[in-house]
Image (cartoon, rainbow, N blue to C red):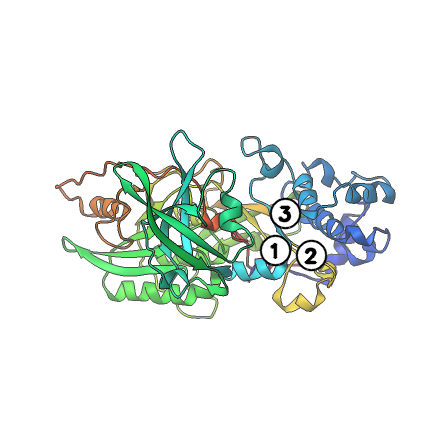
Amino acid sequence: MCGRINITNTMKKIFSLLLITIVFSCSDKDDDTFVYPKESTVQNFMWQGLNQWYFWQADAPNLGDDRFTTNDDYVVYLESYTDPEEFFYQTCYNHSNVVGSSSAIDRFSFVEDDYETLVNTLSGVSKSNGLEFGLARNEGSTDLFGYVRYIIPNSNASTKDIARGDIFTRVNGVQLTDANYISLLFGNSDSYTLGMADISGTVVTDNDREVTLTKSEGLQENPILIAKTVEVNGTKIAYLMYNGFTSGYDEQLNTVFGEFKNAGATELVLDLRYNPGGSVNSSRLLASMVYGTNTKELYVRQRWNDKIQGLLKQEQLEDYFANKTDSGSDLNSLNLNKVYVLATGSSASASELVMNGLAPYVDVFHIGETTRGKNEFSVTMVDDIDNDYIYRSDRENKINPGNRWAMQPLMGRNENSEGFSDYTSGLVPDVVLKEDLADLGVLGDINEPLFARAIQEITGASAKRDFTVKMPVNEISNSKMFTAIKDNMYLDKPIEISFQ
C-alpha cells in the first residue's frame, strides 16, 4: 500500500535537532509548544506535513521555515482559509488550481476529504458504474460529447447495451457542455441516463437510444484488461493492455508474463494508452518483466526536497531491477532489447516512469501521442503526527479521529539511471498516431489501429495499411481524472531513516 515509510524514534529526535529553527516542527514534542484553534486542525495538519515533506517546500512562500515569527502569525495564516482544500492549493507552490496550468509549477498535488476513499482508490477500489470514457469538444462549440474507451468487467455498465466506441451527448436529457459536464457526470447522483449518438463521417448526430447506468461501491478494476499472444507472419507478439499500476495485481501480472514466455513470444506491445499511473514499485516490476532481472542494474533514483534528501542513504534512494515479486515469486521476464509502447496524453506518471526507466537499456518504440508529462512521485499523508503524517495501513487507529482529510502532495522526482527526469512536457512518440473516433477498433484485435501500427513496425510488412485518421480524438478530459487517484504516481517502498 502507498506511503509505507517508517520513521524511527531516533529520526524524530534528529529531526528535532535539525529543524530547531522551524517555529513549528512536525515532531510530536514540538507540536505541544504552540496552540491552534480546533477549527484549524485540518489546516495545521496540511501545513506541518507540507513543511516537512513537500518537494518545493523551500520555494513555496508560505512554507518557509522562517515564515512565521510568532504563534499568532501562524494561527492567522491557518484561519485565513476556512476551506481546507483552498488552503492546501494556496499553500502549495504555484499550483495549477491557483495560477492555471500554463503558469503552474505544481500540477498534480491534491487532497481528499476522506482518507479511506483515497486509499481504496489507490488499491483499485472505487464507487463506479464501470464506464471508462473520454470527453471531446464539438469543433467551434462549447458542446461536448463522450466516447466510450472500455467497460470494466463485472460492473453495472458491463450488463448494459453500451460498448467501446459508443458516443453520448446528453445526460438526463441535458446537452453536455464545458459548463455542466462535471456536475452531470461526476456529481452526487449515483445514477444517470446517457443520450446516445452516431458518427457519420465526422459529424456527431443524436439518436433516440438511451442507457441508464448506476454507480456502486467497492468496484475493483483489474488493471490487466487484455493479455494475449498473437502470431503474425511467423512472429509471436505478446500484447498487454495495462490500465493502472495497482500493486495488488503484481502477482497476476507476473503470471501473465509467464504465459507470454510459455507461448514463445519474442516481441511485446505494451498498451498504456489509458494508464494514468500508480505504484512506483509496480512499475519497477513491470520494467523487470520486460527487460530483465539483474538486481545490480539501476532502474530509477528518487530525488526528494533538501530536508529529506540528505537524511537518506544512497541505497534508500535507488530502485534496482527486480528478480522476485514482493511475495517472493521468481519474476518472469521476456528479456527484451526492444519494446513497443502505445501511449497517449492519458498515459502518465508510472506509465512514463516505465518508459523512462527502461530507456537506458531498451529501445522503447513509442506509438501514439505525447504523454502527460508527470515526473513527480507522491506519498499519502494523514493526520498521524507520531508517524510524521505518513499513512500506514497498520496505523489507521492512530489517525486523528477528528480529521479524515488526506493529502497526496508531490514529494520528489524519479530519474533514470542516466539521471534523466526532465519530461514535464511529456514523452514524444516515435510514430504519431491519434485514436480515430471513426475507427476506434476493438482493443487487442490486430486490426485496431494503434496495435496494427505496432505490428507493422515489428513485422516490416510490405503491404502498408493506410493509417490516416479521419476524426482524431481531441480530448479535454476523461473519467479517470475524476477518481481520487487521477494521474498520481505514489511511492510505495519502505524507507527507514535512522541515525547512529
Q: Nearer the viewer, residue 481 or 44?
A: 481
Mark 2 lies on a secondary structure that is loop
Q: Classify 10 Å Cα crowding around label 2: few (below 14), some (14-19), many (20 and above).
A: many
Q: Nearer the viewer, residue 499 or 349?
A: 349
Q: Nearer the viewer, residue 130 or 266?
A: 130
Give how far across and how far down residue 349 sits, in percent: 48, 47
Give how far across and how far down residue 153 sits, in percent: 38, 63
Q: Residue at image x 82%, y 43%?
A: 74
Q: Classify 10 Å Cα crowding around label 3: few (below 14), some (14-19), many (20 and above).
A: some
For marks 3 and 2, give the CA distance: 18 Å
Q: Nearer the viewer, residue 282 or 151?
A: 151
Quarter of the C terminus within the rendering: bottom right
Residue labelled with disc 1? 380
Q: Earlier in the sequence, mark 2 or mark 1?
A: 1
Q: Are marks 3 and 2 in contact (CB under 8 Å)?
A: no
Residue 422 is left or right of residue 59, and the answer is: left
Q: Residue at image x 45%, y 70%?
A: 328
Give the number of marks. Answer: 3
Inspect the image, locate mark 2, and give the three-letter code of the amino acid beneath it: Tyr
Residue labelled with disc 3? 309
Judge whether residue 343 can be spotted in this image.
yes
Q: Earlier in the sequence, mark 3 or mark 2?
A: 3
Q: Residue at image x 36%, y 50%?
A: 148
